[in-house]
Image (cartoon, rainbow, N blue to C red):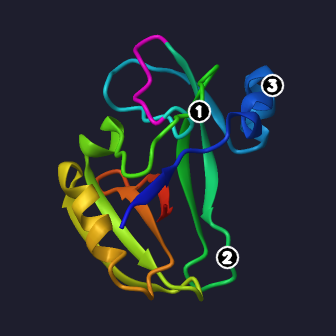
Amino acid sequence: MSFQIHSLPHDDYAPLFVLSDEDLESQGAKRMTVNACPGTPCRISMQDARIGESVILLNYQHQPEASPYQASHAIFVREGARPAELAPGDVPEVIRSRLISVRLFDEDHMMVDADVVDGIDVAQAIETAFKDPGIRYIHLHNAKPGCFAAKVTRA
């Protein structure tokens, strides 16, 4: 069974980059210049931002469903980032290179299982999880800083 990792749409975040730093802060967001790579994973391009690039750190509601697991966390988006074009079964380097928390959800948006795996093992963990027909989707998080990485669905 194949899977699809989803990046976030650029158009949802492009308007943020024309806001002043004060306007961003009033929305709980912050403009930053990247000073280390890797370390600033863009959720649009699914790549680490490069040193000197402008990013915005903002809160993202990655689990908006009516569930006890409703949640949000910080993410980075790069200015001018092109959305990742991931083929079914592809795991981008930004995920393969990190320790990843894999969280499995059912059709009622309840977390039914979770694990932490090395990024190089994420594809196998996803394939194994989707063998269970009760798993509707998966959320990936960076295990160390805890940031949301991506949503995964069946392809």
Q: Amino acid at mark 2?
A: Glu
* Badge 2 or badge 1: first in the primary sequence: 2
Q: Which disc is residue 19 wearing? A: 3
Q: Which residue is rendered at x = 37% and y = 75% of the image?
A: 130
Q: Which residue is mark 2?
A: 65
Rendered image quadrant of residue 114? bottom left
**Left or right relative to 118: residue 138:** right
SS state under label 1: loop
SS state under label 3: loop
Query: Contact, CB < 8 Å: mark 3 with mark 1?
Result: no
Q: Judge by depth and name the residue closer to the eye, 71 or 27.
A: 71
Q: Which disc is residue 83 wearing? A: 1
The residue mark sitting in front, 2 or 1, is 1
27 to 115, vertically: above or below: above
Tell me if mark 2 has few (under 14), some (14-19) or many (20+) residues whose alpha carbon lies within 10 angstroms of its own: few
Which residues, given as a range, are shown in magenta?
46-52
* Relative image position of residue 138 (x, y in whole percent): 44, 69
* Relative image position of residue 23 (x, y in whole percent): 81, 31
* Badge 3 or badge 1: first in the primary sequence: 3
Q: Which residue is rendered at x = 80% and y = 25% of the image?
A: 19
Q: Judge by depth and name the residue closer to the eye, 95 or 71.
A: 95
Q: Is residue 86 magenta?
A: no
